[in-house]
Amino acid sequence: MIGVFGGTFDPVHYGHLRTLLEVCELLPLSEVRLIPCHIPAHRGVPGATPKQRLAMLQLALQDIPRFVVDQRELDRGGRSYTVDTLTSLRDELGAAPLCLILGMDAFIKLDTWHEWSRLIELAHIVVMQRPGCVMPSGAVAELVARHRVNDKKYLMRSAAGGIWFQQVTQLEIAATAIREQVAQERDIRFLLPETVREYIKANNLYH
Ligand code: ATP
């Protein structure tokens, strides 16, 4: 079973990596594709360029064989929509089970995503519990009511269509706070891999 994890990764940090590793072990997943977006659909312009965000992701993942950087959103260019990414992955993977992995903060706003109701037809959705987030309401809660599965084995038996909530060690780390700390010349060690911290320093990012 393959996982897909999209983000701005501006920069990638241990909040992403530690929780993903746990999801990978607990489901289990054979591989997770980390997909940096080109132009994010739901937020302002990132502080680092697409090339820099990609370089930081590659540095962070170099010793983790199960985590693979997938550049398809950068290659496609323009605004990045998850529905397009899942459609192209589905074309490649045929009927293999595919899990779209999201933090709860992203999941509760799923109904604002482009063609959001198609996502569950293309993949399962695995939601990681993140500190300070409530359960969804409205249209997303209705989606949960229709698609939530109580046995994760269901995810392995079908290509798409299930929603699974995964408890993970909660790490309150956010890229926004890291960028702010860099701008204030504070020390960002232990929030992200050393290789990424060195890259930020060497390229004078986020000042
Ligand atoms: P920013 O602060 O710039 O908005 P971010 O740290 O939330 O960034 P993104 O790259 O925007 O990171 O998020 C990509 C995905 O990672 C989203 O699904 C988000 O919910 C998830 N995520 C981010 N930080 C954490 C964390 N600390 N724990 C679990 N999931 C996280």
Image (spheres, rainbow, N blue to C red):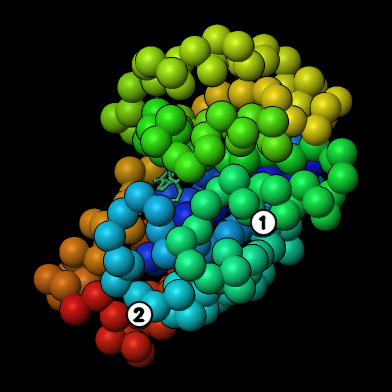
Q: Is residue 130 visible?
A: no
Q: Which residue is mark 1?
A: 33
Image location of residue 80, percent across then percent down: 50, 58
Which residue of the protein is positioned furthest toward the left in this rendering?
184
In the rendered image, the vertical position of residue 118 relative to residue 143, given as above or below:
below
Q: Position of residue 23 (x, y in %)?
A: 62, 39
Q: Is residue 39 above or below residue 104?
A: below
Ligand 1 lies under 8 Å from the Cβ of mark 2: no
Q: State the CA–CA distance, disc 1 to disc 2.
A: 23 Å
Disc on res. 200: 2
Q: Measuring 49% from the left and 13% from the top, which residue is drawn there?
A: 142
94 horizontally vs 116: left or right: right
Residue 130 position in % (x across, y down): 40, 34
**Where does the image place residue 136, in percent across and percent down from the top left?**
39, 20
Classify residue 205 as left or right of residue 115: left
Q: What residue is drawn where x is 32% and y is 84%?
A: 201
Q: Residue shown at 31%/54% (left/top)? A: 43
